[in-house]
Amino acid sequence: MNKRVWLCVVVSVLFSTSQAQAKDVIVEIYKKQFMPSEIIIEAGDRVIWKNIEKRQYHNVWFKGSGEEEPDYFFPDESYQRIFDQLGTFSYECGPHPKMKGRVIVKNAE
């Protein structure tokens, strides 16, 4: 096998392996709560917050990181984010600051 083909195979395997390991983690929003309020994920995973309320709007605001407050999302809508960096990321709902959650991102084991 020539070097170029071999390199393409290696890159392809590495890319597909890293993609296969990443997963989606669902956090439901119901009765003005993030459920679960704390999750532990691996780097590269995607968190999807789903608003399953009947009438209430929410957002997911990583206020402590200095981000501006994001747009609201309404019942049957969702917000998602991929976490590539390790660490603990606290968030809250802007319109309902008593709603708090935390994402803990660890290395894949």
Image (cartoon, grey):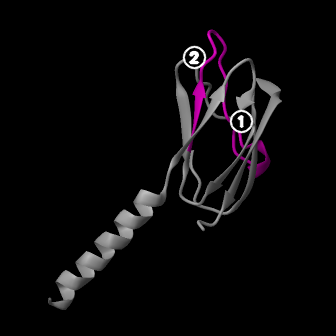
Q: Residue furthest left?
A: 1
Q: Which mark is residue 58?
A: none
| Highlighted magenta segment, given as a residue range | 47-68
Q: Quadrant of residue 92?
A: top right
Spot occupied by residue 26 in the image (x, y as percentages of width and height): 58, 37
Of the 4 image quadrants, the one containing the N terminus is bottom left
| Crowd tier of the residue under label 1, counting other residues whose Cα lies within 10 Å: few below 14, some 14–19, many 20 or above | few
Spot occupied by residue 106 in the image (x, y as percentages of width and height): 67, 62
Sooner in the amino-acid sequence: mark 1 or mark 2: 1
| Crowd tier of the residue under label 2, counting other residues whose Cα lies within 10 Å: few below 14, some 14–19, many 20 or above | some
Q: Which residue is mark 2?
A: 75
Magenta segment, prevailing SS (helix, strand or loop): loop
* In this picture, residue 31 sits left or right of residue 47: right
What amino acid type is highlighted by mark number 1?
Pro
Q: How many circles with numbers are drawn on the protein?
A: 2
Residue at 47% in and 59% down: 21
Q: Which residue is mark 1?
A: 36
Question: Nearer the observer, disc 1 or disc 2?
Answer: 1
SS assignment at label 2 = loop
Residue at 76% in and 39% down: 101
Q: Residue furthest front?
A: 109
Residue at 56% in and 34% down: 79
Is residue 49 part of the magenta span, yes or no? yes
